[in-house]
Image (cartoon, rainbow, N blue to C red):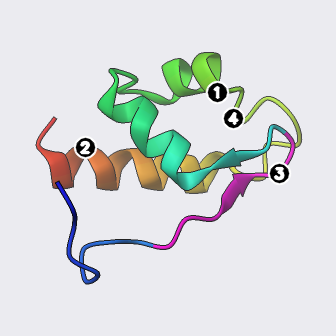
Amino acid sequence: MIKSPLEQKPDYLVCICMDVMRSQIEQAIQDGCHDFKSLSQALGVGTGCNSCVAEVQEILLETLENKNI
């Protein structure tokens, strides 16, 4: 299913240390990572410098709310 351009968000690097893109975080959430700990275990986010932690948590909450997961 193709999303309308208005629904698409630009993909960008969220976790520089582990080279994790926003799309990878969103996909991991869709695949069952519904808390920060599971995202961290699956993708390694928040295990380096920790500067991405707040943004990853924001993406997590936003994705869960928008997708009704």
The disc, 1 or 3, on the residue closer to the chain's N-terminal end is 3
Vertical order, 9 against 21 (above or below): below
Within 10 angstroms of label 3, few (less than 14), some, or many (20 or more) residues? Answer: some
In this rendering, the label closer to the viewer, 2 or 1: 1
| Residue that carries the numbered disc 3 in the rendered image | 16
Label 2 to label 3: alpha-carbon separation: 23 Å
Q: Residue 10: horizontal and vertical position, in percent? A: 50, 73
Characterize the local packing of mark 4: few (<14), some (14-19) or many (20 or more) Cα atoms within 10 angstroms. Answer: many
Question: The disc labelled 4 sits on which kind of residue?
Answer: Val
Q: Amino acid at mark 1?
A: Leu
Q: Image point 55% across, 48% down: which residue?
A: 56
Instruction: Give yes or no for contact between labels 2 and 3 (Cβ–Cβ under 8 Å).
Output: no
* Position of 19 relative to 48 (above/below): below
What kind of element bears circle 2? helix
Tags 1 and 4 in contact by the CB under 8 Å rule?
yes
**Residue hosting label 4:** 45
Q: Earlier in the sequence, mark 2 or mark 3?
A: 3
Q: Quadrant of the N terminus?
A: bottom left
Give whichever of discs 2 and 1 has the lower sequence position: 1
Residue 51: x and y in percent read 78, 52
Q: Secondary structure at mark 3?
A: loop
Q: Nearer the viewer, residue 36 or 42?
A: 42
Residue carrying label 2: 64
Q: Amino acid at mark 3?
A: Ile
Percent coordinates x, y for residue 68 in the rendering = 11, 43
Residue 65: x %, y % from top left: 19, 50
Residue at the spot 79% in from the left edge and 29% down from the top edge: 47
Q: Main secondary structure of the magenta part?
A: loop
Which residue does the image show at 33% across and 71% down from the upper left? 8
